[in-house]
Image (tube, coloured by chain):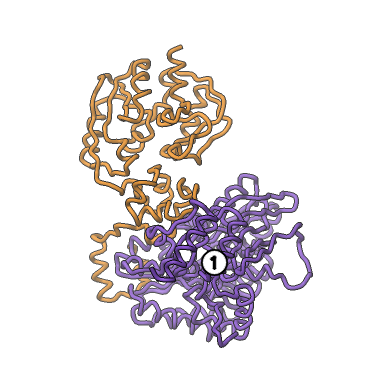
Amino acid sequence: MKLKTLSTVKITPKLLLNLIQLPFKKVEKPCIYCPGICISVCPTFINTGNLSLSPLGYSRYEDLGRNNCLKCWRCVSECPLSYPLPESYASEVKLTLEVLKKRETVLLSARNLDEKYSYGLSELLGTGLILINGLVERYDEGRPVNPSSLKRILRALKNYRKVYTISPESHHTLSVPLLIENLSGFSIRLNYNGPIHIPCLLLNREEKIIQALISIGVRPTKIIRDQCLKMEEPDGLSLCPRASMRNVKTIFDEILASLSY
Amino acid sequence: MSERSILKEDFLKRVKIIVGSRFTDDPRILKVYSRDFWPLLTLRESRGDELAMPLAVAWPKTVEEVTSLIKLCNEFKIPFTPYGGGSGVTGAAPCRDCLVIDVKAMNKIIELNEEDMYVTVESGIMIKKLEEYLNSKGYTIRHIPQSFPEAVVGGLIATLSTGEYSTKYGGIEDLLLDIEVVTADGGFIPLREKIVPRTSTGPNIKKLMLGSEGQLGVITKATLKIFQIPEYTSKNTFVFNSFEEALAAAREVMLLGLQPAVLRIYDKDEAALRFNEDRDLAIFIIEEWSKALLDAKESELRMVMKKRGALEIGEEYVDSWLKKRFDVISDVVKLVVPLGLWFDTIETAATWSILPKVYREFKREVKMIKGVNSVLAHASHFYSTGGCIYFTIVFEANEEVYWRVWEKAMDTLIKNGATISHHHGIGLLRKKWIERELGESLKYLKKIKRLFDPNNISNPGKFMEWESSEA
């Protein structure tokens, strides 16, 4: 607390005691003190107008959150406290790593999220391949990552010269660079002209992603950023491997096609 | 099963017929709708106290569904309350045993008229979504209250809200051109066939919905003025020797017709918290559609400030305010709650001649209350006749202190000729004092309520409710 702020406050003995203990006090559930600063970006709220199908409801009832929250993390970017509501619904998940193919440059794959693309891409790009287990549980079940397991993974990844990922989830949790921002390094050119859908977890990287795609020949006619593919089929070319589960074309289909040709 | 229970069950079956799956009586969902953002309700909820639960929540999608629901409520004599963003701070929206008519499934933009400069919307549209849509077309409604991320148009009208830019663009009452209402007795007042800029055709009954807080029916559509997004903006901050000096400068600015988009004067206590600055200061945003006008206003503003001995210190605090203005929880979660404190905000308005006294007396009287730790103040929303002062009070977290603060605050404001509310409205919070402010007018407001709502089912228990002796 800044001294100038302190000077405006009448200090009583009780307040002084609480001030001393302040560094050790933490509000566990901040959402009940909020009118819902984040709700305008919550897809389930926008779709229904139902306040309980928003962080206001999910923060009060874990089961509502577990069953209805999309765990898209849009609310976290709006929250002044960056409170990680989407990972507060269940117990911790431990991340583990399997090295499937060792090279200096590796592609990081997330089990049950992007194997459909990562195995083939790794072959065609000539990279190594690492498989991470546990990420899908974070983003589907709302489970926080066990901090020690995260540290172990990050330490292990330092052994490689370059690591890339195609999953927004891997990028979000592990801060691994996105393959789609580095395609020029693999001499990939794409011939796509049309709308591009930005995944929820990559909204903060929209500008960099679009610049990178333009540099390899993509011509975006429209940027779609308000759709969560866990809720609806996105318009346009998706940058998220998950979209293939909805039979939606992704940029990885385009990349694989161009590499095979 | 009691007769009352059978009645309720029948009622809920009929609600379900009207809105289908857009209905619930799930207690978890009812709990979310038992609150708005009244700090007293949040304090109670944080302590695990029971709040006043509604009966059920329905999300009608059409005005026909709203009409059917209200007629049903009249048939069964079961109360209803309209519900928007739930961001009000006075307990106006929550209603025990009511059918909550949540308007947010009615959120379409019906018409944007770029020639005549208005937009018509369904009442459940979020003001933030409306502003984003208008911005994408080069327009703005410039109605930006602190509840901008949560509020909906219907609720803003029902609470007579103002936004941060109201000094230039006006409050909601200045923006509102027309309204569509389903009245509390199940009647229907449609939008005009054609908007006109002004009309002298008798008292405008629709304007009664402004500030009605859900007590006269449900607002279903609204037509509002829009503006082109101003191309030219100037931001600046000036430091004064005192809050009162800054108020005098603000008066001069307003009488010169400079009409800034944003003018906020912080006393040194509030400046310390917001900007880590222990001086009284004023932040300005001037915005215009013409460079020449902007330059002229900037030049005049500097002359006024120089004459008043104010020190110009640049844009930094304006940018800081712009970045943090919707953050209502960081201080609460990081400081107020862990320190065992609680807070509320009390906004008032008064004319220039008494504004300084209102500021001094309020701060002095409220700060003296046992249990109060801090009284901060800023002034904003200015008029040719005066302005609004917005007090933030921090105190020990208990209800006894809470009500002591409000008793003293309201008494001080009324005694000094200020209003008990500039823009937050009445709700349950200020119900006790409304008669002192309105006098005989309240009697006539209650007669109007009785006319619109003969069964007393439209958000009952709030300030327009009549007693049988008042019939």
Question: Is B280 left or right of B141, judged from the image as shown?
Answer: left
User: Dividing the picture into quarters, in which one does residue B30 lie?
Assistant: bottom left
Outermost residue, right side: B200
Which amino acid, by three-letter code, is at mark 1? Answer: Cys
Residue B162 seen anywhere in this rendered image of the structure? no
* Residue drawn at (66%, 50%) of the image: B110
Question: Is B37 left or right of B221, judged from the image as shown?
Answer: left
Determine whether B24 is above or below B418 in the image.
Answer: above
User: Which colour represents chain A?
Assistant: orange
Q: Quadrant of the C terminus of chain B?
A: bottom right
Location of residue A155 in the rendering, given as x and y in whole percent from the top left corner: 23, 33
Location of residue B326 in the rendering, given as x and y in whole percent from the top left corner: 47, 58
Please name whichever residue, B329 or B11, is drawn nearer the observer in this view of the structure.
Answer: B11
Instruction: Identify the element where label 1 is drawn.
Output: helix
Label 1 sits on residue = B73
Please name whichever residue, B121 or B239, is drawn nearer the observer in this view of the structure.
Answer: B121
Q: Residues within 10 Å of mark 1 (few under 14, many from 20)?
A: many
Determine whether A78 is above or below B437 in the image.
Answer: above
Q: Which chain is purple?
A: B
Outermost residue, bottom side: B469
Determine whether A17 is above or below A157 in the image.
Answer: below
Determine whether B28 is above or below A104 in the image.
Answer: below
Q: Quadrant of the N terminus of chain B?
A: bottom left
* Residue drawn at (66%, 62%) of the image: B179
